[in-house]
Image: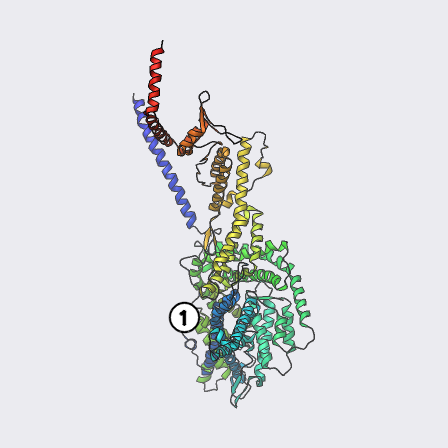
Amino acid sequence: MQDNEHHSYSAPTEEHLDTFRKFISTQNQELRSLESALEDSSTDVWDPYQDVVGIELRAHEDCHISTLIETDSKDISKVLIVFSTVAEECARLVDVAEQRFFGPLSCYGERFDNSPLPEGAEVEQISSFIPLLEDLSHFAARCHSVVANALSQLAGLYTDEKNTLYKSCFKGTRLHSFLTQLGELLRVLITLDGLVGSNQELQYHWSEYKRVLQSAALEPEVFGMRPKRIAKVLMAVMRLEADVFNGAMLRGCWMQDLPWYHEKGEGEIRANKTMLEEVTSTIRSLLVYLSAHIGDATESNHRKWFVGVVGLFALFAQVNRGRELDSKTYKSIVSLSSKVPLIVLFGRAFFVVTDFLHDALPLPATKTREKELEKTRALFLKQEEALLQQLQRLQLEVSAWMVRMESSFSPRVGLTEVLSTRANLLVQGVLLASQLGNVGKLSLSGHLWTRTAIRQSSLKPLMQSFLLLKALQQTYHRKSFLIASHLVHIQRFLQLRVLHILDPICKDLETQIATARKGGWKVEEPKVHMAALVTAMCDNLRGPNTRQRRTVVNLAWDLLPKKQIREGDVDEVGLQLRKLEILGSLQEMVGEATDCSFLLWSRGLLPLFLADLRSNWKDVNQIHGLMAAMGDAGRLLKEAEEEGHIPSSSVSSFSRFLKETVEWEIVTPLSQEIETDLRIHIHSAQISQMVKSNPLKSGTLDLFACLQLQPVFVVDEFVNIKERVASYLDSTFYDLTTVTTHDWKTYAEMKNLAQDKYRLSLIETYLPTGTLDQGLDVLEIMRHIHVFVANYTYHLHTQVFIEKPGENKYIRSIGIQQVANSIRTHGMGIMNTTVNYTYQFLARKLAIMSQFLFDDHIKSRLVKDVNFFRQNKM
C-alpha cells in the first residue's frame, strides 16, 4: 500500500522536475548565446561606420603654437614659432583638401546605368558644381600664398650674411620635417590637378557649359539675359578655368611673385643661392631616406612623401629656371621611380614621375615622351609578378600580426610589461596596411592606366588584398577600447625614451652656460641656441602627443646640431619620433591605408570576385569583407551626394547595383543548389530505381554554413541571405505546385526537409486550391449551380455527375474524389455553404413548379388524368 502511494506521489514530482530541467537547459542556452554575442572574438564582423558611439584616439589641444614654445633664446623661439605655424597651416590645408575636394572631384559624372541623359542635363549638372569649383579656386589661391610664405621664410633663414643665425647655428641643417610638410601641400595640388584632368565627364561638361555661354553671348535675347551680364559671367568662367583646369593649381605656385626680404632690402628668392643649395641638399637626403624605405618592410606613407618631394624638386627647379638643372637630383628621382613607376593619388588620378617631370620641367628632348611612357608601362607589367608574390608574404604577416594583437591586447595581460610590444604591434599594423594598400591599388589601378586586361589568376590575390585590408581595419576597431585605454601610456612611454636621451644633454648644456656666466666668460651663442632647441623639445615631449607639439619637436630636432650627440642616440630619437607620429595619427593612417574607395572605378570586377567565392561555398563568409570594401566607395558617393555635388540618386543606384550583383552571383546559385539537394534527397527516397549517392564517397556541399551568415551590410541596408533563400524556395514551391498539383505532397516533404537540414522556416502555402485533380471545385459549382444543373446529369449507378454531350471533344465528370479534395482544401465549413446553396436553389425551383401546377390548363389536364386513373385502377 505504501509503495502504491509512493508511486502516486512520485509521478507529479518527476513531471515537475523534468519541466524544471527543460527550463534550466533553455535558460543555459540563452545565456550562452548572449555570452558569445558579447564576447570579443576575432571572427566577429564589425562595421566601424555603423557603431552608435565611436572613440576618438587623436589628442587635441586648444592652444596656439606660440604658447608651446618658451625658451631663453628669442631668436630660436621666433624661428620655431614661424616655421611651426607655416607647417601647421600646410597640414590644415591638406586636411581641407582631402575632406572637401577629393571626393566630389573624383565622383563627378559617375553613372551606374547606360540610359541617355536628358537634353541639357550636362549643363545643369556642371552649373550646380560651379560653387565647388569656386571654392577650389579660393583654396588654390590660399595654398599659393602659403607656399610663397614658406619659401620666403626659408630664404630668410638660409641667408649667408654676417651676424645671422645661419652663420652661427644653422649652417648645414636639414629641415626635413618642414620641407616634407610643404611637399604634402604640393602633393595635394598635384592630386587636385590630376583629379580635374582625369575626369573626362567634368572636362566634357565644362566645354558644353562654355559653348552654351558663348551661344548666349551671340544671342542674349534668346536666353533672356542682358549682354553685360553674360559678358561678366563669361569672364568669370574664363578666370575660373585659368585657376583650376589644365594643371593651373600647381603651376600657380611658381607663377607668382616670390619675394625675399633681407637686410639690404627686397629681392627675388631665386637670388638666394644659399637657400637653393641647402634645399637641394635636403631634397637629396630625403630621396636617400625614401629610397631606403620604399619597397621595404618599414614603408608606410612614404610614396605620398615621394610625390611631395618630386613636387618640391619641380618647384625649386622653376624658381631657379634659367640656370642649369640639378642633374644629380634628377637622376636620383628617376632612379627611385623605377621602384614605383606608378603611384595612385586618389581615385582615377595617377602619378607617373617621368610624365610629371616632362610637364613641370623644361627638360632636354633626349627621349620622346611616348617612349618614356612605354618604358614605364613595361616596368609596371614586369613588376606585377613580384607584387603578387609580395601579397602572399603580406598575407602570412597579417595573419601572424592579428594573432599577436589578440594575445597582446587582452584585458588579462598586464600594462607596464608590454608597452613596448604593444607600441610595435600598433605601428606594425599601420605598416602592413600601407603595404597591402599599395600592392592592391598599384596592381588594380595600374591596369586601368595601362589599359591592359587583368589575368584570371590575379583576381583571387587582388580580392585577398582587399579582404586583408578590411580585416586589419576591423581588428583595430574591435580593439579600439583597449587601444584607447593603453595608447596614452604607450605614447608616454615612447616620450620618456626620447627624454631619457635629451634630458642629460639639456642639463649638460645648462650647466656649461651657467658656469660660463658665473665665471664671467662669454657664453658661446651656438650652445645657447642648442640649449633652447633641446628645451623646446623636452617641454613639448612632456605634454600630450598632439600634432602641434609633434610639429615643434620635429622642427627643433631638425634644427638641432647632431655633432655632440652619439650616432646611436640620433637614430633612436628619430625612430621614437616616427613612432609617435604614427601613433598620434593612428586612426587617420589606418583609415587611409585601409580605404578601398578606389573600387568604385573597378566595380565591374565585383561579379568575378563573387563568382570566385561561389566556386567554394566555404569561402562565402568573406562576402562581409568584400562588401565592406565596396562600402568605402558607397561612403565616398554619399559624402559627395550630401553636399549636393553629384545627383541625388547616385548612392541608391550604386547600392542597387551591389544588391543585384549579390542576388545574381550568390543568392540565386545558392538557392538553386539547395533546391537541387532537397529534390535529390526526396526523389531518392520515393523512386526505388534512382541511384542513391553516398555522401562519404561523393562528398557534399557545405551549404548550411552559408545560411548561418550574419546579414550582409550593403551601403545603406542589410541583405539577409537566409531570408532571400527562403523566399526563393517559397516562391518556387508555390509556382511548381500550382502547375503540377498532384506533386503537392512531394513539395511539402521538401519543405519539411529544408526545415530539418537547413533550418529554413518556409511558409505554408495551403495548396492545392481552386481546381484539383483536373476537376471542378465544389465552391465553383455552388457559385454557378444553375449552369451545373443545366449541363450535368447524374449517373445513379456510379454516383458521378457527367457533363452532357456537346461540341467539345472531351466531357468532364465530378465524383466523390473531387468533393473530398474540395473538403480537404477548404475545410469542413464548405458543407454548410453547399447545403445552403442547394436548399436555396431547390426552393426557387419548387416555387416555380408549384406555380406551374396551379395553372388552369395544366390543372384541368391533371384532373382528367386522376379521374381516368381512379376509374381504371384494378
What amino acid is found at the position of numbered circle 1 in the picture?
Answer: Glu
User: Quadrant where the N terminus lies?
Assistant: top left
Residue 203 as seen in the image, left or right of residue 370: left
Asked where in the image residue 863 lies, by quadrant, the reply is: top left
The answer to whether one can see residue 717 in this image is yes
> Residue extending furthest top?
874
> In front here: 856 or 411?
856
Which coloring applies here?
rainbow
Q: In x, y percent, where is residue 441?
A: 57, 62
Residue 89 locus on image (x, y percent)? 47, 75
Number of marks in picture? 1
Nearer to us in this view, 598 or 582: 598
- Give the structural element (helix, strand or loop) at label 1: loop
Query: Is 807 drawn above or below residue 234 in the view shown?
Result: above
Residue 633 in percent (x, y) is at 51, 60
Crowdedness near tag 1: few (<14), some (14–19) or many (≥20) residues, C-alpha within 10 Å: few
- Residue that protrudes farthest toward the right in the picture: 366
Look at 59% across and 60% down and name the residue there: 444
Q: Which residue is drawn at 51% across and 46% down?
A: 706
Residue 313, quarter of picture: bottom right
x, y percent for residue 506:
47, 76
Quadrant, the C terminus: top left
> Looking at this view, is 382 or 769 the one in front?
769
410 shown above or below 151: above
Can see residue 553? no
Q: Nearer the viewer, residue 397 or 209?
A: 209
Q: Circle 1 sits on which residue?
A: 61
Q: In this view, does 716 lie to the left or right of 693?
A: left
